[in-house]
Image (cartoon, helix red, strand yellow):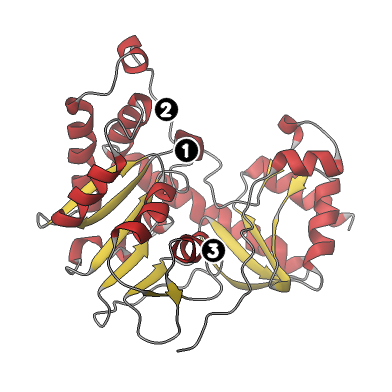
Amino acid sequence: MKQGPSYLNRDHGGGIDAAIAAFGGVRKDWIDLSTGINPIPYPVPDFSSDVLTQLPDTGLYQSLETAARAFWNIPENMGVVPASGASAFISLLPRILQGTTARTSHPTYNEHRASFEAAGWQMTDDTPDVDISVHPNNPDGRLAMPNTQCKWQIIDESFCDICPDASFVPNMTNNMIVLKSFGKFWGLAGLRLGFVIAPHALCLKLQNALGPWAVSGPALVSGAQALSDPDWAKMTRQRLATDCKELTTLMRQMGAQTVGGTDLFQLYAVDDAQDWQTHLARHHIWTRIFPYSKTYLRLGIPTSAQLNRLKAALNVR
């Protein structure tokens, strides 16, 4: 059995505090394009005092589940469980699922592999017990394919609300586990809200492992309202598609080549990714580079004002 490559450092986007320490400035002056987070988030509702002062009751959970089922078209034979971010399930699933071998693609979001390895699973290139896909993939936007040969297929759809027609959820098979995140398309990473959609028996195990009150009252209320607002979602997809095209036009004018991506982030090939990141950081624009590539540069989708700053910074490069 082949071992997976030892390429992974658990690097991530974000880290503005470290960027400030290296390049100066204050947080409000920085543009963070290192993540795939929608820069114009869903407007968080006003909370009544009881949402902040009382433990979340069953009604808030039920309202969120109802909204989630309608928005994602979740089949009746599948359950849905919320938690404080999709990362909660990424950490928990390797300790709940039965098996010994798992597989991830490369390049991809590195927390899945790290979590399975930490739980004692062996990574393999052969047919695994658990096959893990990010869909669309981070950082190149590849779409996953169904895998009926494994016991479980984990499909991380953290970025899939940008392209809902590609979602596996409406046609899930009994070996599928789908993850959803509120930190990307909805732009509310700090809210810490994520979901697992899976067969009911597995959802019950995950719910028991999470324990009571796994989601805050503000997150429950915000999530239910957002998932009940398809008009905002439609307008946001249109805006991000337009902004993405404008970003790519600029980057190609500056000599970058498109490798892949989504309407939440774009991956480019440049001559020297570290040099590009350093130059932009001196203008207080933070971008994403990768330890396994000297040429990959990933940018989140900027607003119009942010695009103007990016253009100005690149024009003096």
Disc 3 target residue: 110
Q: Which residue is mark 1?
A: 188
Q: Nearer the viewer, residue 22 or 102?
A: 102
Mark 1 and mark 3: span between their CA atoms? 21 Å
> For residue 44, which numbered disc appears in the image?
2
Viewport quadrant of the C terminus: bottom right
Cα separation, mark 2 vs mark 1, equals 9 Å
Q: Residue at x 43, y 30 (%)?
A: 43
Q: Quadrant of residue 209?
A: top left
Nearer to the camera, 186 or 203 = 203
Residues at marks 2 and 1 touching, judged by CB atoms closer than 8 Å: yes
Residue 49 rendering spot, x and y as whole percentages = 35, 10
Say how many tags the image has. Answer: 3
Tag 3 or tag 1, which sits nearer the N-term? 3
Disc 1 and disc 3 in contact, CB within 8 angstroms: no
Q: Nearer the viewer, residue 122 or 191?
A: 122
On screen, residue 167 above or below 70? below
Disc on the earlier residue, 2 or 3: 2
- The amino acid beneath tag 3 is Asn
Numbered disc 2: secondary structure: loop
